[in-house]
Every structure is written in C-alpha cells, then in structure tokens.
Image (cartoon, grey):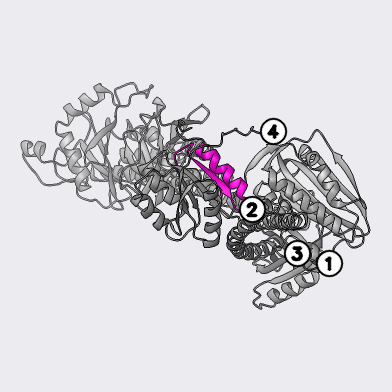
Amino acid sequence: MVTRAKKSKDEQEVNPQPAPTVSRASARQSDRALALRRHLAAVRAEPATILSGTSLETSLVELLDVVVPFFCDWCAIDLANSHGGRRRFAVRHSGCDHASRENEIDECCTSGLLERVPGLDAICERVLTSGKTETWPSGDHPYCAVIAMRVNDLPFAAITFALKEGRPGFEPYEVGAAEDVIFTTATAIERLLFLQDAKDALRHTQRIASQLHQLIASSITVAGLRNEQEILMSLASSTRSVFDADTAIVTLESGPAAPLYGVAHRGKKPLSLAAHDPAVLDFPNTASGTVVPWRENDWLVAPLLERRDLARGVVAIRREATSDFATEDKEVLTLLSQMASTALAAAELSRTIQHNETRWRILVESAPVGIVEVTTEGTVRWWNRGAARIFAWPEYDESTRGDAPVFPDEARERLGALWADVLAGRFSSGRDLSDVEIRARRRDLTASAAVLPSSDETRSILTLIDDVTDHRELKSELRHAHQMEIRGQVASSVAHDFNNLLTLISGYAEILSADLASEDRAAKMVREIQSTASRASLLTEQLQAIGRTKAPEPVVFSPQGALQSISEVLVRIVGVDVKIAWSLDSSTNNVRVDADRFEQMILNLAINARDAMPQGGELGISVSPFTVDADLAHDLNVSAGNYALISVSDTGEGMDEETRQRCFEPLFTTKDPFKGTGLGLAAARRLVEESGGAIQCRSELARGTTFEVFLPTVQELAAEGTSPISVAVPRDTATLLLAEDDQNLRRLMVQVLEHQGYLVLEADSGELALELARDFEGTIDLLVSDVVMDLISGDELAQALQATNPQMLVLLMSGSADDAVLDRLTPGTSAFMAKPFRPSEFIEQIHHLLGRRGAEPTT
C-alpha cells in the first residue's frame, strides 16, 4: 500500500500518508518481494519458530531474520500494552552483528533507525491506534513502512520496515508482501496464545482439582477430630498445603476453647498457640460485620462464621514471594472456612452430645427405680443399677451382656401382659406386681412400660420397675404413728388426771397407815392399797412413754451391768418354773439410754416371756457386741455401726405371724383381761427408737419367741451416781403459797402441810395465786404449784413471782411434765416432783427446799 499524492518535503515528514491497498494479483513481482515470500515459506517449514506456531516472545525476534536483510535494512517491533501505550520489543539492522541475541534492542540499531526516520515514534503510535499501514516519506518510492499487527482483533504490535540510503524504495506490491508476512505472523501468534491459554486453563484446572482433592482429604481428617486444638492444627496444615502458602493460620476467638490459634509455617510442624503467646500479635483478627474474604496487608483472610452475621475466628494465608491471590483463591479459602466452621460446630455438638449422654447415663444409673430394656419377646437386653438392686442381678457391663438375667416367675407373666398392651398401642398406667419372691423375701413391685422408637424394624420395650415394699410399709407405719399420736394424747391426758388420783390414794393411805399402826389387819390392807397405787403409777409411766409426755433422761451405762443389778428381781418375777440362761459378754461397750426405762423394758420382756411359758421353760438373756452393716441398717432403719445386741428369748407358746406384726402396737394384747395392758412392748419400742436403735421380734408357734434389741454403743465411761445431799429439817415455821386446780389433791396437801406446822395460802388457779401473793403483807417462803393449769401455768406463775423476788423458793409438780420447766427459774431455788408421790416424799422435798433459805443460789 503506497500513497500516490505529491506533497512537499515538510508535509511528508510531519504527515506520512497511509499506503493505498494494491491488488496482489495484478502487482508486478520484484526480486525483493519474491525473495521475501520464498524465505517466509522456508521459515514456516521449520518446526521451532514463531511462524510454525510453537513459541511466542522468546522467538518473536525470528521475524527479524525473515525480513533482514532479505527485505529491508531495519526492522523494529513495538508491542502495545494494556494501557494504550507501547514498548519497543526488538530492533534489527543489517549492518550489526546479531550472533548474540541476549539484547535485541541494540542502541546503534535504534539510533540509526531514528536518524533515518525521525518521526517514527509518532507513526507507530498512530498505526497502533488506527490499525492502518503508513509509509514515509510520501512519494512513489518510500523507504519506510509501518504495518499494524492485530491479534484476536486487538492491537498487538507495530512493525517498522526501513531501507538505508541508496537503496530503491518500497513498491506497493512489496508493502503488500510485508503485510502478508505480518498477517501470517499474527495468525501464528493467535494460535500460540490459544495454546497457551489452553495450557494455562489446564494447569488452573489441575490446580483447582488438586485443591479440591486436598480439601476433601482435609475434611475427612477433620471430621474424625473432636478437640478444637487438634482441629485448628489440622486445618492450618491443610490450608497451607492447599494454597502452597508460606504461612497459614486458623483462629478461634469465641467459644469454650477460645482464644486458640492453629499455625502452620512452610517446612515446620503445625503449632497450637494460646492468646498470651507473643507470636499471635501479627495475625489477623475477626473483622466486625465481615462475612466475605478480605485482604489485610499480605494476608488473604476469610471469616469462620458461627452464623450468618457472626464470626468466631478467621482462616488466613500469606505468601512471602508474592501477595497476588486469584479470585479462585478467595473461593477456595471460603470453602475452607466453611469446612472449619462445620468441624468446630461438630466438635461442640459432639461434646454437647457426650455431655448430655453422660448426664443421662448418670441419671439413669442413679435412678432409684429399675430401668430394663427388653425385646418384644421379653428377653432382657440392658438394665441399670436400680434394676440390679431390685432383682439381685449383677451390674450390667459388656461381660454380662451375653448372659442376660431373667425376671422372677411371679413377675414375668404379669409383665408379659403389660408388654402386650404397649405393643398393641393400648395405654397402660402401670401394673402392681405383688408378692414377688426375690432373695427369699417377698417384695411388692410396680411396673410401667413404653415402646422405644427404632430406625429399623427391631423394636424394644423400656420397662420401669419400682420396689414399693418399703414405701407401703412406711405408709403403714405412718398411719400407725398417727394412731400412736392420737393414743398418746389420750394417754397423756389420762396419765395427768390418773396421777392426781394416785397421789390422793397414796397420800391418804400413808396417813391412814400411821393411824392404824396397832391394828395389823387394817395396816395390811392399807399396805395393799399402797402397793396397788405403786403398780398404777408404773402404768401411768408407760402411758407417758407412749404419749411422749415425759422426756427421756439418757445416761451412759453398761448394759450387762444393768442386767446384773436386776438379776435377783428377774429371778423372783419369773418364778421357780422358769430357768434363766445368762450370756453377758463383758467386751460390749456402754450405751446411752434412759436407765429407768431400760430396766422397765427388760422387766416387761421377762414378764411376757414368763406368761408365754405357763408350764415353765427357759428364759435366755444375752448381751453381745454386734456390727450392723449397710444392708441390715437399711432393713432396721438405723445407721450402720457398732451396737449392743440385747436378746431376750423364751421357749414358750410363740406367736402367729399376724400377732407378731401387731405385737408393738399400743394397747394390743393377747392376755386375759386385767392381766395385760398392751403398753409394755409399745413403750419398749419407743425407748429403743428414741435411743437410735431398733427392736425386732422373731417367733414361731410352739417354739418360742425372741426379742432382739439393738442399741448403739458409745466410747464414754459410765456415769457415776451422785450422793444425796443431807439437808437439815427446818425447826421454824414458814409460809407456803399452794396453787393446785384439783380440789381433792389440794385439800390433801393442805392437811399434810398444816400438820407440819406450815402456814398455807391455797389457790385453785394461777391467777388467784398471783392475787394472794400481791395482797399478802408477810413473806412467802415457798411456792408449791402444779404445772398444768388453765390460763397461767405453774412455771409461768413461778417466773412472775421471781420477777419481784428472785430468791423465792419454788416446788413444781406434774403428772405429765418434767424438770425442764425449771430452766427459766433462778438457779438453785427450785425443785420438781413427779406425780404420784407419797406425803412423806412431799414433806421431805419441802424440808429440803426450805433448808436452802439464806444460802447463796447455785449456778
């Protein structure tokens, strides 16, 4: 393409003209054009050249070999860049030595070309922009032609052809031959770029496949981990390997294990770092509100999302050689962060499941009821400790799994009906399994069941078994205790009134005895009255024990010593037809019990044994140390430990089972009227239980009965008895204030006191006693008062009088209360008497108190 218009030389230098297109078919071929075409064909036939389509930039300079010196003296290649500019890639000059091609841009070649074509740079820029060929200078024979090379329809290069001075300029058909060379070269470059893109795409695909393969392998590895530290170390190592990074880090900034860091460096083992480690200071942290990957300095970072808008940490990578990361890197890193989030969530879920499973296992194993899993045929699969305890099975473990236990025969048939109901979908509220024999004992059970859901066709039944024997016995004992409480209240009321009557009987009998001392027959009858009153007094004490109206006074003593002290009494009580067999172990430790009630209990047991042997027999009494283990402690309802076992047995008639179970009930007796009260065994049971022990009865008809008393032993020494203090009987008179609401008893006490020379102010209530004390102008030396009175009790009356006179002496009496009523009175000024009492005992106590007048009160 050659411009034919004539222009001035200046215009030619400033504005070179584009070469017109020339028809190649009609163009006259010159030797120079023919040589160029032949050389082009020869070069294309060679395998490793640009024109054969096997290389690119490193071989692009071979284009220069095609045209220099065969076609032109200079050839320059200017490549277009992505910013619309250009850079000079290569320059060739026929007059230079190009044996060494390390530097294709030779300064001598460039300077000579620019001298030959002064406006070459401007021409190249225009050609790259327009894509059209330009020649210089304008005229018929220009010696410079700049041809555009387009690759994939985009400007790629501007190729300059120039002739030295003296050579004929380019003909239009010669420019056309050069354009053919450029077109052929552009086609080869397009092919090479396509092949390069294909190779790059293949390498990229292979890289992505490798990354995905590593991701899959990493996910499989991480899926088996249940520890955050191991998960973070494994993820950091996998992340560094997937991206071929120099450093990878996975951070955990929230959760139970946070803060925690997993770090992997090239050529080093992965590490787990804590928050206080100085090495973590340069690592990226979670960006608030960021849910997509981001760049932070040299790091590519992706968040570990706990939920859509909340991150718990990050996954980050860094390459030291380059900080360039492709779009695919961000996508793969996002997949890694999602995998890390899933693994951490799975670890937390697994830990939660394990924790819940442990809690439920502990709950099931510690449940007080039996839990048993059975097949639909009733074969036991699994059971908890409660079931092992109820049915006396071994505890479940893998060793017992193959040897499953079976239900007792009495329970299996009724359980089968229960299982059939739940398998049929019928509601079942539970079944009673009464009188089931387990370990030679009859137990009452309750059972309920439910079908367990299953993912396959195999179904099983969960059966809950509860041993309600003790519960029902406890309910029975509760009803019994309620009845006892009611009877005790009645007994307390009866004992109070009865003691007043006994005091009257004993008092008048003692007075009458003194008057009839010379009449033997009358005196003997009076003594019988006194003996009967004493026996009635013993009966009221038993009533008080049943009603708990009299507090026990426990002391430490030796049980075998106490039995030895009453041995003579026991011999007299049982009579000559009953032989007593003693077995007293001296190694038995002391016990802490109310001594009087203990002796009374032994006497009652001995009397019962005597009555059970009307034809005579043997009474066995033994004391021995005994250790109560946990099982027996549960049966006896006591604490495990060391006990003294007191056994009283006989060879008498025995009791049937119904009588044996009721023998400790108050007022229950099998004796004839007026021979038994039904209070002795009830009082014994009350005493033993209040002392922390237990009593049980074993009996067989025609073979005898044995009562076993378990009393806890102590290491303390036995209490020493105190010697009574001798008090002189006062010789002077005294004024006494008597408060007693029972008229007959008050009259008796007034007679006894006045007979001793005392001045008595009598009142039938606490209110009247206060008025008498307020109105009396003299000094009241002693207050004698019943404790139980309406409105103002005896102890309240005493407190009111001692509020104005702290040294006033006080004697309180009661048939139901005890000496605890003296606790709020001035120490050393008071005494207590239990009803019934004899007049002599009453006067002795009065004398004893009045003997304290003028003495310092004790503390």
Within 10 Å of disc 2 (Cα), the crowding (few <14, some 14-19, many 20+) is: some
Residue 67 shown in magenta:
no
Within 10 Å of disc 3 (Cα), the crowding (few <14, some 14-19, many 20+) is: few
Three-letter code for the amino acid on which mark 3 is drawn: Arg
Q: Circle 2 — which element? A: helix
Residue 830 shown in magenta:
yes
Along the horizontal axis of the image, is 792 left or right of 672? left
Tell me how far mark 3 sits from mark 1, CA to CA.
31 Å
Q: What residue did someone put label 1 on?
A: 409
Identity of the residue drawn at 52% across and 62% down: 743
Three-letter code for the amino acid on which mark 1 is drawn: Asp
Q: What residue did someone put label 4 on?
A: 718
Whole-percent x, y for residue 744 in the image: 55, 61
Tell me how far mark 4 sits from mark 1, CA to CA.
54 Å
Q: What residue did someone put label 3 on?
A: 662
Q: Circle 1 — which element? A: helix
Point out the tag, 4 or 3, that comes first from the N-terminus.
3
Foreground: disc 4 or disc 1: 4
In the rendered image, the residue lying farthest to the front is 518
Three-letter code for the amino acid on which mark 2 is drawn: Ile
Looking at the picture, tell me which residue is in the foreground, 371 or 731: 731
Foreground: disc 3 or disc 1: 3
